[in-house]
Structures are given as C-alpha cells and as structure tokens.
Image: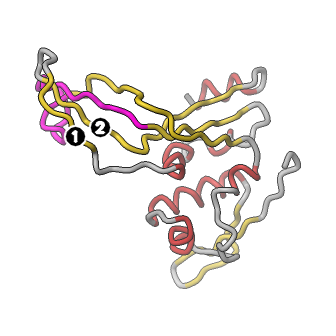
Amino acid sequence: MKSKLTRLLNDHPIHLYHPVPQSKWIVKETAVGEHISRRKSPKRGQLLDIFNELTRIPHLLLHPNLTLTVLLTHQEEVWRDDGQGSWRRGRQSIHDQRLLQVIDSHTFHGVADYLAVLPPSLPQPFTNKQLAKAVGCDTRLATRISYTFKAMGMVEVVGKNGRSHLHQICYNDPRA
C-alpha cells in the first residue's frame, strides 16, 4: 500500500477509508457453514487505534492530496471450524467479516486534524506516559502516536526526564 500511495499521490487526490471496529461479534460455524454460536468480543476499538497502522506511512499523511477517514464500526466476524486457521482461534479460519453499522467517522487532512486527538490539558513538553494518561490508552499506543507525530514533523524530542523522552508540539500547518 505504501508504494502504491507514493506513486499515486503526486498526480491524484486520494481519499482513504479505514474501519476500526468499536465492537465486534464473533460468529462460529461448522466446516460446512452451519451456525454454532455468536458472542460479543471483549476487545473494544477507539479512534486512536488507527495509529497502529499509521506508523507505516507517516511521511505521506500530510500530503495535500491525501485525506484519511477513520470509520468506527460495529462488525461481525465469522469463524469457520475448518482446521486451517490460527492456533489462537483453535484452528478456526476467519471466513467472513460483515459490517453491521458505522457508528462515527473522523476525517484527517491537515495538522490541525491530527493534533485534535491530543487533549488541551496535555503538558508541554510531555512523555509517552503522560500522553497515554491524557488520551486514555496504553503506553504502547502512546509511543506509536508520538512516533507518527515525530515522523510527520509535528513533534520533536526536546530532552529527557530520567529514561523518558520529552516531546513537544512544534508544527503549525499552513493549511489549518
């Protein structure tokens, strides 16, 4: 996807849509497709989960021809007991994913849209631990957010506090 976007962005406007499942139902079927059970997954998605994917293309995110829309969804995932799937799912394959409902959408086009995910109460400079607490996520995701923002040129490392890097917002978008 990265190489395709790199080639296309210079000549074409691209609107990229990415679903993030806010809630998911898991439907289990036999190998021939007969319904066995349906349960709700305990995993919950949020808007910030998009940063797990954005770490791969941070240099493209501020391109004027790229618009990213994140869709928060309810979806259903069908697991088929065919013995071919991952050991984590008990050898059940993901047979289908069905969109049940789009709950919300958020569009990112410029620096202001990306910085809007950060709360105004975030201290300057901030550590990844402070960022995680402020946005309500784990430090692993906060690290990915700060990495993406650094690679986009929106945040810079201004020092250290013990073993933690201190980050500061340093970018003003001319389009904002």
Which residue in the rendered view is the most extreme toward the bottom? 162
Asked if residue 52 lies left or right of residue 94, the reply is right
Query: As rendered, which of 3 and 141 lies closer to the eye?
Result: 141
| Residue at x-position 58% and y-position 31% | 17
Residue under label 2 = 25
Q: Which range of residues does the magenta coloring cover?
A: 74-92
Front residue (pair 118, 63): 118
Q: Say which quarter of the image contains residue 85.
A: top left
Please state the horizontal and vertical placement of residue 18, each as a whole percent of the image.
54, 34
| Picture mark count | 2
Q: Dots 1 and 2: beta carbons under 8 Å?
A: yes
Question: In the rendered view, does 83 fall on the left or right side of 79?
Answer: left
Relative vertical location of residue 93 with respect to residue 145 in this rendering, above or below: above
Q: Residue at x 63, y 45 (%)?
A: 58
Circle 1 SS class = strand
Task: Give the class, few, some or many, for how many residues have Cα within 10 Å of label 1's Cα (few <14, many ≥20).
Answer: few
Choose between 166 and 141: the one closer to the eye.
141
The residue tagged 1 is 39
Which picture quadrant has residue 2? top right
Which residue type carries mark 2? Answer: Trp
Lower sequence index among marks 1 and 2: 2
Q: Quick one: which residue is furthest to the right in this view?
A: 174
Q: Please state if 112 lies on the left or on the right of 79 as rendered.
A: right
